[in-house]
Amino acid sequence: MISSSLDGVGPYSAFRIHFWKDPGDQLGVLAPGGFGGQRFARVRREFARFNEVISVHHEPFMGWSVHVHSVQNKLRAQVRQAVTSRGIPLLRARLTPEHPATWLEGHRVLQVGVDAAVSTICAIESLGAHIESAEILEVEKATGS
């Protein structure tokens, strides 16, 4: 699902995919990939109700990687629907346009998280310890459920 969803996105032809058995961390507090629990320069508590389910990382010399976190079995179908209907399109929208070469300097991360009810999704773009942009969207309800 992930590789086909991100197929043909911009100039990024190769992604490494990592599957984590642990649930994702809260968004907006700790910088992703931060060493020793580095906090964001400005902690954004309004994002703390979301837990990461998927993220795309770019690190100099390492390239692109996709990180997928586990979710509770009872929420799996809802999270999958939220990620496919809202999360992947948000990731594609950020990765598709042409960016200046400096966009790839440093550790850039695009995170997607859901709230506990899987009714709202949050996407955060960060560079190092700084949140560059964020968006919160309602999750479209699956038809027929």
Image (cartoon, helix red, strand yellow):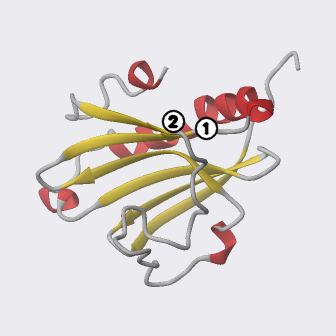
Q: Is residue 108 left or right of residue 81?
A: left
Residue found farthest to the top: 144
Residues at marks 1 and 2 touching, judged by CB atoms closer than 8 Å? yes
Residue sitting nearer the eye, 41 or 134: 41
Q: Position of residue 65 (x, y in %)?
A: 31, 41
Which picture quadrant has residue 28?
Answer: bottom right
Mark number for residue 89?
2
Residue under label 1: 86
Question: Mark 1 Cα within 10 Å, few/some/many (few <14, many 20+)?
Answer: many
Q: In this view, does 85 lie to the left or right of 15?
A: right
Residue sitting nearer the eye, 72 or 39: 72
| Residue appearing at x 59%, y 77% in the figure | 44
Q: What residue type is labelled 1?
A: Arg
Q: In this view, does 74 lie to the left or right of 25?
A: right
- Element class at badge 1: helix
Mark number for residue 34?
none
| Residue appearing at x 63%, y 31% in the figure | 85
Q: Position of residue 45 (x, y in %)?
A: 65, 76
Question: Mark 2 Cα within 10 Å, few/some/many (few <14, many 20+)?
Answer: some
